[in-house]
Image: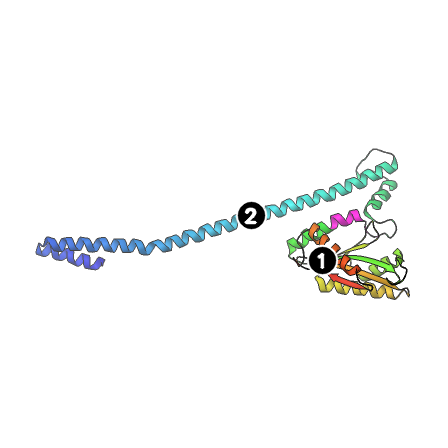
Amino acid sequence: MGALGAVSGVAAVTTAQPLLGLAAGGLALGAGVMSRKGSTPAASTAASDAATDALRVTELDEELDMARLREQAMQQRIELLENAARAAASTAAGMAPGPLSQTGPTNTRASQHVLTDALTGLFSEAYFEVALEARIAAARRRLRPVALVLLDVVEGRPSEVTKGADADLVTTALRRTLREADTACRLDDGRYALVLEDTPENGAIWTVERIRNHLAESGTAHTVWAGVACYPAHAFDKVEILSQAEEALRQARSWAQDRIEIATAD
């Protein structure tokens, strides 16, 4: 259309025809409008893509900031636990609280008591509360799974008169089964909590089966109930994964035999 306008314009000049000049102007105007329309979608698409990229960068920055805040909060929780250990040690020693590095053997023993179970030497419930949250945060950063297992072990069968399992036997079975990267804790109510790094639900089931087999080797009949919940398959934070494992253990205890129950994702 632009070319036709140019030809009409030349003809109008050479022949002195006003109508040809008017036609040339109209063709040139139409060519300009069509050119503008043709370029608009490309420019609009480019602007839209740029806006989308900018929004994604902003979202990633916000996610990174949140991850940093969670890590800082975790470090603060660990420091609070260490301070509690120092305070307990100072109270036992009859002195004002001070840095752990400046205290004597009594302080060290009191600190260990806060972090470990006095009966078995496994980690305590106080340590478990912090360790579970820390392991989930680490698994989130590394995009790896982590499993929580709650164990309830009794001596005998549910159809018989049962009593709590010997803590030494259970502790020995745990130590023979778990890896160095795993965490074993004895809770205040006598149950056991296992935090298994880089472990999906099938790995957690296999771990419980090995513990049960080690207990069977003692020659004493035991009943083992286990509730298993995993990040990220069943939960995304400490409160949710603990709640899921508790519910799974409750369902396992309804069976009059050894039982492993797996949490279900909502």
User: Label 2 belongs to which residue?
Assistant: 61
| Identity of the residue drawn at 84% across and 59% down | 153
Determine the image quadrant of residue 210. Answer: bottom right
Q: Position of residue 247 (x, y in %)?
A: 74, 56
Q: Where's the N terminus, which quadrant?
A: bottom left
| Residue toward you, 12 or 233 | 233
Q: Is residue 59 magenta?
A: no
If you read the primary sequence from the N terminus, does the residue marked by circle 1 or circle 2 appear first?
2
State whether residue 239 is above or below residue 227.
above
Q: For mark 2, does the 10 Å Cα neighbourhood hold few (<14), some (14 to 19), or many (20 or more) residues?
A: few
In depth, the one of 130 and 240 nearer the eye is 240
Q: Main secondary structure of the magenta part?
A: helix
In the depicted structure, whether residue 218 falls above or below residue 138? below
Residue 170 spot, x, y in % from top left: 86, 58
Q: Quick check: 90 above or below 7?
A: above
The circle drawn on residue 229 is: 1
Describe residue 201's horizontal placement relative to residue 122 as left or right. left
Number of the label disc, if any, that sits on residue 79: none
Q: Residues within 10 Å of mark 1 (few under 14, many from 20)?
A: many
Residue bounds of the magenta highlight: 122-131
